[in-house]
Image (spheres, rainbow, N blue to C red):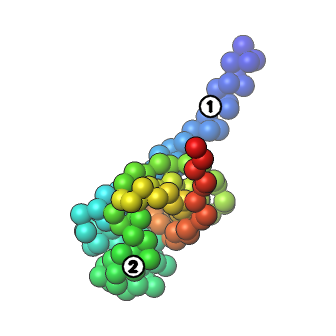
């Protein structure tokens, strides 16, 4: 019986983290889907207030994404890697294969707002080496 209680406690403790991971990945995926169809207005709604303030409009935001993050704008495949709870912020690593077959590893910084999870930044990391 004691083992069962420990298992239940561990499962309950992991519950919010799993829910956050799913919600975070849902926001990132929704923004990428909006990018794919050039719906920068919708994509901009997934950006945190700091990002919205920095770019001021969906058009400016879209221009930055097309120029600086083409792998996110028109990705081939998207794979979610580890998520990390960093206190007030969460980090989600994502592996994206672009339309040319090149790998890109990105780290999304996420913040929970009154309107749900928002993307507070994206950092391009060194892509993993692919061996034969």
Question: Residue drawn at (54%, 59%), measured in percent from left and top?
Answer: 105
Q: Earlier in the sequence, mark 2 or mark 1?
A: 1
- Where residue 78 appears, as percent x and y from the top left, is 43, 51
Q: Which residue is mark 2?
A: 67
- Residue extending farthest to the right is 2
Task: Give the side of residue 67 with respect to residue 19, left or right.
Answer: left
**Which residue occupies the foreground of this view, 116 or 83?**
83
Task: Give the side of residue 98 with respect to residue 107, left or right.
Answer: left
Q: Secondary structure at mark 1?
A: helix
Labels 2 & 1 near each other (Cβ < 8 A): no
Question: Residue drawn at (68%, 24%), measured in percent from left and top?
Answer: 7
Q: Looking at the rendering, in which quadrant would you find the N terminus? A: top right
- Where residue 50 appears, as percent x and y from the top left, is 49, 79
Question: Residue drawn at (25%, 69%), measured in percent from left and top?
Answer: 38
Image disc number at residue 11:
1
Q: Secondary structure at mark 2?
A: helix
Image disc number at residue 123:
none
Is residue 113 among what the camera can see?
Answer: no
- Where residue 85 appears, as percent x and y from the top left, is 64, 55
């Amino acid at each position: 019986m004691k083992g069962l209680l420990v298992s239940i406690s561990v499962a309950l403790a992991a519950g919010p983290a799993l829910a956050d991971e799913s919600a975070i990945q849902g926001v990132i995926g929704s923004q990428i889907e909006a990018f794919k169809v050039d719906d920068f207005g919708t994509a901009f709604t997934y950006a945190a207030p700091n990002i919205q303030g920095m770019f001021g409009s969906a058009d400016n935001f879209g221009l930055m994404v097309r120029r600086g993050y083409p792998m996110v704008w028109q990705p081939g495949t998207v794979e979610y890697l580890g998520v990390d709870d960093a206190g007030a912020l969460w980090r989600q690593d994502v592996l994206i294969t672009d339309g040319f077959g090149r790998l890109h590893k990105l780290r999304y910084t996420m913040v929970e707002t009154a309107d749900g999870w928002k993307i507070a930044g994206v950092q391009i990391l060194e892509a993993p080496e692919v061996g034969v």
